[in-house]
Image (cartoon, rainbow, N blue to C red):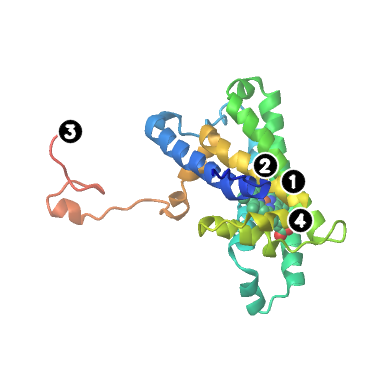
Amino acid sequence: MTHIAIVSTAELWWDIVPYFVLAIAGVATWWRYKYDKFGWTTRSSQLYESKLLRIGSPMFHFGSFVVIMGHIMGLFVPESWTRALGMSDRVYHLQALILGLPAGIATLVGVGLLIYRRRTERSVFKATSVNDKLMYAVLGCALVAGMCCTLLGTTAYGEEHDYRQTVSVWFRSIFTLDPRGDLMLQAPIYFQVHVLIAFILFALWPFTRLVHAFSAPIGYLFRPYIVYRSRDYAKKNQPMGSRAPRRGW
Ligand code: HEM
């Protein structure tokens, strides 16, 4: 007798699709890095327009940074840990609301300004790929859906839901290779929509200008303002420079 395994909706969307998304994001990022190194760029358009960029870009980047930090805390840190530190669930959700919502708004306004600039400045618009246009739309939707989660899930405006017992546990279960899709089904629909939009964004990531996030010049923040080199190199009859001398070219 043959058994036909029927995959439930929960298993398909929350146990299987995340691995497909991770595979697409991982393999395509590697492929792009290997075969499109010259295209691995923000495709900076600062030369075409800088006034709006100077406002929109920091708003978007600093806002995103706080949003990412909030996600790391909310998704990776188990509820039992913050409770053990004496932080009640109410206080946890209050700080997520007070920090997360303004950060989400700043990111959204920032990206809104960047999209407006891209649409109204002819040369910037011409330098925008189809993939990037799609990415901006998905990014905007992910931000709006995320803020709906915070507003509806943690305040009296919607059904209050402790996502750290459902979404966060499911999220961590992906990485321990024991996916708990059943928990995602217990979360309100707006959490599910938010995460599905995030899946689309992650799958698009390697094909867009977002790849520059993987090579952000973080070292610039810590490098000395002026680079001094010791004269000892010269004394020891070695060429000045940071690299050991090599033969040939
Ligand atoms: C699998 C990936 C993701 C999961 C599981 C997830 C989950 C969540 C959860 C549970 C909340 C509610 C947080 C709270 O109220 O304390 C939230 C909020 C939010 N999410 Fe996500 N998210 C994901 C990806 C993303 C992405 C890719 C973006 C941005 C493009 C994003 C943007 C936001 C924003 C703006 C909020 C509002 C609160 C804040 O600023 O942190 N999320 N997300």
Q: Residues within 10 Å of mark 1 (few under 14, many from 20)?
A: many
Quadrant in the rendering for residue 101? bottom right
Residue positioned most to the right = 157
Position of 229 with respect to 216 (left or right) is left
- Which label number is shown at residue 249? 3
Quadrant in the rendering for residue 27? top left
Q: Of marks 3 and 1, which one's residue comes earlier in the chain?
A: 1
How far from the left and from the top, in percent, is residue 64? 63, 49
Q: Is residue 213 above or below residue 151?
A: above
Q: Of marks 4 and 2, which one's residue comes earlier in the chain?
A: 4
Q: Secondary structure at mark 1?
A: helix
- Which label number is shown at residue 197? 2
What residue sits right under mark 4 in the picture?
150
How far from the left and from the top, in percent, is residue 219? 43, 51
Q: CA distance from mark 4 to mark 2?
A: 16 Å
What residue sits right under mark 1 in the picture?
145
Q: CA distance from mark 4 to mark 1?
A: 9 Å
Amino acid type at mark 1: Ala
Amino acid type at mark 4: Thr
Q: Are marks 4 and 1 in contact (CB under 8 Å)?
A: no
Q: Respond yes or no on whether mark 2 lies under 8 Å from ligand 1.
A: yes
Q: Are marks 2 and 1 in contact (CB under 8 Å)?
A: yes
Q: Respond yes or no on whether mark 4 lies under 8 Å from ligand 1.
A: yes
Q: Of marks 2 and 1, which one's residue comes earlier in the chain?
A: 1
Q: CA distance from mark 4 to mark 3?
A: 58 Å
Circle 3 or circle 2, nearest the eye:
2
